[in-house]
Amino acid sequence: MALKALDIYKLLPKKNCKECGDPTCLTFAMKLAGGKADVDLCPHLDEQAKAVLGASTRPPIRLVKIGIGERSFAIGEEFVLYRHEKTFYHPPGIFFKVSDTQTMEEVSAVTKRVRDESFIRVGSDLRCNGIALENSSGTKEMFAAAVATVEKAADLPLVLISEKTESLFAALVHCGTYRPLLHAATKENFKEMCALAKHHDCPLVIKARGLEQLAQLAKECALEGVQDLVMDSSPQSLGEFITASTAIRQLAITRAMPDLGYPVFLDATGSDIQDAAIALGIVKYASVIVTAPLSEASAKAALTLRQNIYTDPQKPIQMNPGLYRVGTPGKDAPVLMTVNFSLTFFTLQGYLESTRIPCFMLVVDTEGLSVLTSVAAGKLNETLVRDALIRFGVENEVAHKKLIIPGYAAPLSGRIEEMTGWKVLVGPRDAAEIGEYLEQEWKK
Amino acid sequence: MGSDIRFGWTGAIGSVILGATRSEGGTRKISYRVGGGTTLPFLDHAPASSPLVALEICDEPQYWPQIVRNYCGDLVDDVSAWATTAETVYGADLIRLYLTSTRQRNFSDIPLVGKAVEEVLSATGLPLIIEGSNEPGIDSEVFQKCGEAGEGERLLLGTAEAGRYRSIAAAALAYNHSIIAQSPIDINLAKQLNILLREIGIQQDHIMIDPYTGTLGYGFEYSYSAMERIRFSALKGDADLAMPMICSAIDSLTIKEVREADTAYQDEMAVAWEFYAGLAAAVAGAEIICVRHPKTVGRLKKAFTSLKTGSDPTGRI
Ligand code: SF4
């Protein structure tokens, strides 16, 4: 049950001491009510108030930080089942798995890949996030040596995978202060695991089959003093994963089972189609995804999907009409007219960039309709084009009066010429052919 | 309290029948009932059909991504052989034939269109999706011809849009085919188009929604949410959106990331791009996923099989 701000306020110390970072207890209460603050920020709360408030005011899914330094990141603190209801905030971390039975060269090489590889798309740097090291040898010596190798190569967030607390203990000697994620506490070993996690202030994965069992384990770990938890339902198929992950998200955000309010862990290496598990994890609420080192193709596709799913869906589908530049076009650069449907725009822009011919894109306001649809509906017409040419001062930018229009707008070419006085050149229908078109028609 | 995740929905996705076997009046080896879901994809209790995978082919390969020719070789010059291979080697559930021949300047050889449809029908026993012309001027004749050539086969004809649906609707009505209704990534426009189609007599069980799929990295985020919203509205009871969806991220093989990939792994990049978008689209609610790279077909089918098994709708696993 969520509490109202006023009910929360009644439980606060009313000192208005500002130590929580808020100016008054009341504003702090309002934040708590909105799930935007953590009760722990107020140092003056008595235990009873904490217990009451803790369960009902913290964000429905706990924020958990993994790693320290530049590449560290946070997961959790999500509020919705569908991204269109608000947005998804914290993209899942993707970890390449290595084993302590591999050679040090191999371990080091994978670590360096994650350290160095990045891929730039629409202005952001896309990268995988860290290394998941598995204690396949079963010995603490080999595990510790492998951790030391990883640490020597890079300061990356880590997942340490071992059922043996002694192995984790040995590994934590090397990386215990860097907030690695420990995998995993089970019904059998959770007390020792919690002690380790608590001692090093590390986040901890809990693993159980069945949601009630996971919730129970989470509760027990919290009682041991470890709250930075991540949940592994150890699915046996992709179908089990999507069912469990959807249930966890739904039951957590509605607070029907608050003990499930932690981010979700997915080991994609367990699937015989790893790409499917990764894609599914990205769209269906996984926060930590462990995979075998990915090929360049899989990595790019996975990172692009992650970027797509975690962009704010409120971003409009229509571009602002205007004159856009590709490269640094000069006075003799071509001017290409297109519509303000953002997909059309981005597709054309992509092809234009790869032609390496600097040019202008004149984006006219078809209210987000594609070329074909806007021509058919009469939205795209000569008046619209004339007004855009004037409004965006295209004549001041170029020393010619030639306008390239999309192939599907060909029926309008005569009328555009008459109304604007510009010479109209009909470009290809398919944006993919624009490079060839410019080479042949514009350059001659 | 249990970990039950029934959402209390009352609506259900309608279904559309594609293809007709001999006993159903056609010549297909198999027919499909697409749709019928009552909750989010893959959470279904009942074994509602897995999403289907369609391989897209065309009758005039000069308008097709080069990467497909590189992979398939001369096969792409013989539409019949291409269709047969799609079924027997690539393992597609459906074939989507694009009549790209109609894109040639001043195309007027309408009988050629009928011939292409007939050839593909005899080359494969799979149900067909036919993409007609891209030129409003010849729409009427082209769709009429396709409809006639596939009479009795329960084709899926594409693609109707808001300003351009009459010819295709007429052909569908005359020969009892279904149609693809495409709107530019907008739930309201999708709904409006479905209403327009209903008003001219197309039954709801003859419509598939195409919410328009932007390729991964090129608008896919919009398409993904449009699909989720359409599915969600249908489950909440909006009958004008309760049709199954079809998705085709057709630019996947021509975007920069794929085109400029090193030739040594260009196929892999193409498949990854189609696969990630296709899987995500199916999770958002698409029932037919169309792809162009033959290797994507098997991967998607395998993934859908794994998604369908072992799930228990109560969330207890
Ligand atoms: S720290 Fe506690 S007592 Fe102080 S202002 Fe904040 S809520 Fe009030």
Image: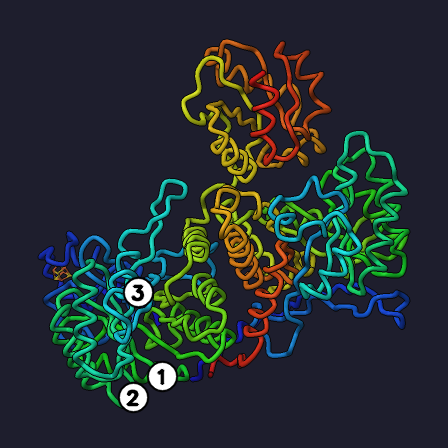
Name the residue rendered at 36%, 65% in the picture.
Answer: A287
Helix, strand or loop at label 2? It is: loop
Q: Is residue A371 left or right of residue B7?
A: right
Residue named by callout 2 = A187
Q: Disc 1 marks which amino acid?
A: Ala
Are tags 2 and 1 found on a single chain?
yes
The mark closer to the camera, 2 or 3, is 2
Q: Are marks 2 and 1 in contact (CB under 8 Å)?
A: yes
Q: Please provide percent x and percent y for residue B245.
A: 66, 58
Please state the chain letter of the residue tagged with numbered disc 2 in the rendered image: A
Instruction: Calculate the distance from the C-alpha at mark 2 to the C-alpha at mark 3.
Output: 26 Å
Please state which of residues A264 and A152 is positioned toward the viewer in this rendering. A152
Instruction: Calculate the distance from the C-alpha at mark 2 to the C-alpha at mark 1.
Output: 7 Å
Examine the rendered structure and indicate whether residue B294 appears above or below residue B199: below
Q: Can see residue B24?
A: yes
Residue named by callout 1 = A208
Name the residue rendered at 53%, 19% in the picture.
Answer: A334
